[in-house]
Amino acid sequence: MIAPIFVSHGSPTLIFDDVPARDFLMQLSKTHSRPKAILVASAHWETPAPRITASPAPPTIHDYGGFPGVMYQQQYPAPGDPALAARVKALLDDAGLSATLDPARGLDHGAWVPLKLAFPAADIPVLQLSLQTHLGPAHHLRLGEALRPLAEEGVLILGSGSLTHDLRSVRWRGPNEEPEWVKSFGDWVNTALVEGRVDDLVNYRQRAPNAARNHPTEEHFLPLFVALGAAGKGARMERLHTSVTFSVLRMDAFEFAA
């Protein structure tokens, strides 16, 4: 089995920024087994119902604005896998989570930024799965649970979001000092994962300190539940990395082993 992983992908410029999270991602493939394919649940693809990329050659999407020109020259030419996409759809359909295939959609920066650092050769097939932010954490836990057979078959289920994501409070310059309202939330999530408090995590918005402040919208937290669900009940969590960028973006990464 390839253990599902959640990573915080940060700014698109993470591929160039000299920060600990970048260093961590660059070492990931050296410390983990090579998956036969990667299925990414990215915060940057939201649809009313689940969709799966099904292109044999998914294009690189530059889904951002206002960055230096070099950011629009980046490519991640990993192959797709239409047959695997059909299998993902079948698993979701069987779980009552009716899904559709998208033959044109490419890889957004929530997928290709961490993968370009972790798997720079771009020689592993990559698919993306969309989020349904309006349906909340429990739905995304179910998505992950439906995908568990893929993890057992050597597919890396990768949730890509951010442990905290209040862009209104980002400090682009100056000291990279983590405020207490960020630290308290990040530490609560870590403890809840270690202790296996899935119900608390699903209801984090009511139970975690400063939850709404750290996630004014939920899309960057929901990929965590896809990875958690794919590991199955009773999964053990290991925090692979923790750091902060721009003072308020916690860049934690977690692995979920059965």
Image (cartoon, helix red, strand yellow):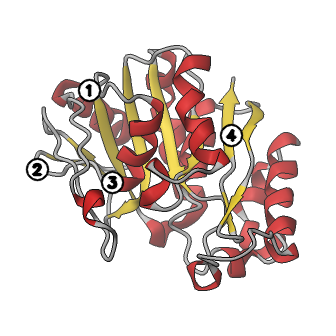
Is residue 61 or residue 42 the one in the foreground? 61
* Label drawn at residue 104: 2
Secondary element type, mark 2:
loop
Q: Is residue 123 depicted above or below 224 in this figure?
A: above
Disc 3 from disc 1: Cα separation: 15 Å
Q: How would you rate the neighbour count of disc 1 (Cα within 10 Å): few for under 14, some for 14-19, many for 20 or more?
A: many
Which of pointers 1 and 2 lies earlier in the amino acid sequence? 1
Which is closer to the viewer, label 4 or label 3? Answer: 4
Earlier residue among tags 4 and 2: 2
Q: Is 15 situated left or right of 85 in this image?
A: right
Residue at image coords 51%, 45%:
159
Q: CA distance from mark 3 to mark 2?
A: 15 Å
Q: CA separation, marks 4 and 2?
A: 31 Å
First in residue order: circle 3 vs circle 2: 3
Which mark is in front, 1 or 2? 2
Q: Is 160 on the left-hand or right-hand side of 111?
A: right
Position of residue 166 in the picture relative to residue 209 (left or right): left
Report which quarter residue 205 is drawn in.
bottom right
Q: Secondary structure at mark 1?
A: helix
Dot 3 and dot 1 residues touching (CB under 8 Å): no
